[in-house]
Amino acid sequence: MKVCARRFNTYLVLVAVLVCFCGCHTAKKKPKDLSLLRIHLEAGSSEAGMTDNVSVLRTHPLSVTIGHNPALTEANVVLASIIDSPGGFSVDIKFDESGALMLEQYTAANPGRHLVIFGQWGEKIADGRWLAAPLITHRLSNGQIAFTPDMSRAEADRFVLGLNNVVAKNQNGLIK
């Protein structure tokens, strides 16, 4: 009987040593990167008091007057992706049904104006700037917009990842 007790104690000591060395580490979850997207419509000069002047692009700044309220936000995004091209890359944003309808209406009614795109990204959403101001040349009826952003490829990867994280978070919120 004493032999069994010793064997039991030996097993108990081995388990205690394994627990001490291996431990139960609670892994801190890395906060997911989140991104914000704001697409504003270029405003006319007659809309004083409801507009802001912004400078888009860092190398060759373009001054644009925009309305205070964004036409589309990250809440309307269904999917964000990066499209590689021979000269670089572009960011492709696909909108949900209501976002697609708004994009179609804004682009159909405002040819010759700019869609001014603002983005923020990162863990603290500290980085952010005006990314692009594509000229509206035709009605966008497919619910997608692709633009060449004023950002590095690494920033674009983080921005797109953050937008897709926001999309997933919004979808999980709707399901629960």
Image (cartoon, helix red, strand yellow):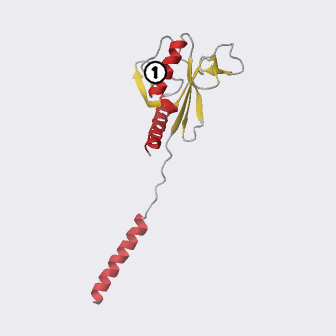
Q: Residue at x 46, y 41 (%)?
A: 174
Q: Is residue 4 above or below residue 128?
A: below
Q: Which amino acid, mark 1?
A: Ala
Name the residue nearer the viewer: 21 or 94: 94
Query: Residue 62 vs residue 1: left or right?
Result: right
Q: Residue at x 44, y 39 (%)?
A: 171
Q: Is residue 106 above or below residue 28?
A: above
Place of residue 86 in the rendered image (x, y in percent of width and height, measured from the top left): 40, 18
Q: Residue at x 54, y 23 (%)?
A: 150
Place of residue 101 in the rendered image (x, y in percent of width and height, measured from the top left): 47, 22
Name the residue nearer the viewer: 141 or 57: 141
Query: Residue 83 vs residue 69: left or right?
Result: left
Place of residue 94 in the rendered image (x, y in percent of width and height, measured from the top left): 44, 26
- Asked if residue 116 can be seen in this view, the reply is yes
Q: Is residue 170 above or below residue 1?
A: above
* Secondary structure of residue under mark 1: strand
Number of marks in the rendered image: 1
Hey, which residue is sitting farthest right in the picture?
Answer: 49
Residue denoted by label 1? 146
- Name the quadrant containing residue 164: top left
Mark 1 is surrounded, within 10 Å at the Cα level, by few (under 14), some (14 to 19) or many (20 or more) other residues, namely some
- In the picture, which quadrant includes the N terminus? bottom left
Name the residue nearer the viewer: 42 or 6: 42
- Asked if residue 156 can be seen in this view, the reply is no
Place of residue 107 in the rendered image (x, y in percent of width and height, measured from the top left): 51, 15
